[in-house]
């Protein structure tokens, strides 16, 4: 039975559906004693401990470590906002759709904490000398992993079930939109060095594909968070299906062109990592250009599969609507 997506305004009632099989009490301290409330308290605690451990020994320096620190602080702050809104029963006054915002944020937070749990120990913590600073960094990584599990659990609990009336972002296509934009952001981070793509127009086309598809997916998310889907001149499921089809076609070109021009020597690429002089340097601990090219190729394939799955689910929504 398909999931029914509706545009619903949440009112300040005493209960709201949490997707856990029982109502979650809001506008009362009892909201913290419900399963979802306890889970968010765990998220709050883990992210707070993670950035506190790192800050207490100043174990963050450089772009990657700074980004991980920002991730933990941002997740802590946003989780605190969500808890305060539910405790005060202010969902109806929140500027964004409360049916869509919490699960959208939880999905992003899970992805960010997962990436921080991988990036921080591999690019920074492992290079620290044994001692208090290294121990704090290891503990922060552990709490970051727990935070990821907590956010992923919230997504699993609150996502749409078959036959359930809910917001679009709680459905599989909505969660795929979050994944697509997140992967695109990681791609942008890897191609921040213009020399990776400016040597050939075909590679510049790939960068344009990443940017266009990111913007399209972000627009779809913002339309749902702002509850502006009714303002579109065409039905929203048809709009989503068209976006997914266009993105699949664009990513299909990037999936072929990027590795062809980056790794095929006939087109000026480097087929082996050893051909990059920076990759062979023992003093170069950061990702070299060949590593970045490979990472972008893998992420392109991941996003292509995500858009393909998005197209399948979006087409089903159009079929059900018809």
Image (cartoon, rainbow, N blue to C red):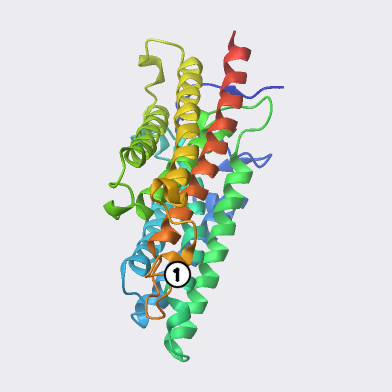
Farthest residue, direction top: 322
Image x and y of residue 79, in percent = 44, 53
Residue 208 at what x, y percent from top left?
33, 36
Above or below: residue 88 compared with residue 282: above
Q: Nearer the viewer, residue 74 or 280?
A: 280
Q: Quadrant of the N terminus?
A: top right
Q: How many marks?
A: 1
- 149 left or right of 190? right
Tell me the quarter of the picture where residue 278 sits. bottom left
Q: Nearer the viewer, residue 273 or 187?
A: 273
In the displayed orientation, state which residue is furthest to the right.
Answer: 1
Residue at left 46%, top 33%? 253
Q: Secondary structure at mark 1?
A: helix
In the displayed orientation, state which residue is furthest to the bottom: 131
Residue at 38 percent across and 60 percent down: it is 289
Q: The C terminus lies in which quarter of the figure?
A: top right
Is residue 27 at all visible to an observer of this figure? Answer: no
Left or right placement of residue 317 versus residue 86 in this view: right
Q: Which residue is mark 1?
A: 120
Q: Position of residue 177 (x, y in %)?
A: 48, 36
Classify mark 1: residues with Cα within 10 Å, few (<14), some (14-19) or many (20+). Answer: many
Foreground pick, 146 / 208: 208
Q: Is residue 224 above or below residue 236?
A: below
The answer to whether residue 248 is above or below residue 62 is above
Can residue 123 be seen here? The reply is: yes
């Amino acid at each position: 039975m398909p999931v029914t997506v509706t545009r619903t305004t949440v009112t300040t009632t005493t209960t709201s559906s949490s997707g856990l099989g029982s109502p979650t009490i809001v506008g009362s301290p009892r909201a913290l004693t419900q399963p979802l409330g306890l889970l968010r308290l765990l998220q709050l605690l883990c992210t707070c401990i993670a950035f506190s451990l790192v800050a207490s020994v100043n174990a963050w320096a450089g772009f990657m470590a700074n980004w991980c620190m920002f991730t933990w602080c941002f997740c802590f702050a946003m989780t605190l906002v969500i808890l305060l809104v539910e405790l005060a029963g202010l969902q109806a006054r929140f500027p964004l759709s409360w049916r869509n915002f919490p699960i959208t944020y939880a999905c992003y937070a899970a992805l960010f904490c997962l990436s921080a749990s991988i990036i921080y120990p591999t690019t920074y913590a492992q290079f620290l000398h044994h001692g208090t600073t290294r121990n704090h960094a290891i503990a922060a990584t552990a709490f970051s992993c727990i935070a990821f599990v907590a956010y992923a659990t919230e997504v699993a609990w609150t996502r749409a079930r078959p036959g359930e009336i809910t917001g679009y972002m709680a459905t599989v296509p909505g969660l795929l939109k979050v994944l697509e934009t997140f992967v695109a952001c990681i791609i942008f981070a890897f191609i921040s060095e213009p020399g990776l793509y400016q040597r050939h127009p075909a590679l510049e086309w790939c960068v344009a594909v990443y940017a266009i598809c990111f913007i399209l997916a972000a627009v779809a998310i913002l339309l749902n968070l702002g509850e502006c889907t009714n303002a579109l001149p065409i039905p929203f499921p048809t709009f989503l299906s068209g976006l997914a089809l266009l993105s699949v076609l664009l990513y299909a070109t990037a999936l072929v062109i990027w590795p062809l021009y980056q790794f095929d020597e006939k087109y000026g690429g480097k087929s082996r990592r050893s051909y990059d002089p920076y990759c062979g340097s023992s003093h170069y601990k950061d990702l070299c250009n060949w590593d970045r090219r490979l990472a972008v190729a893998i992420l392109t394939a991941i996003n292509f599969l995500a858009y393909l799955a998005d197209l399948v689910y979006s087409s089903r929504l159009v079929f059900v609507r018809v």
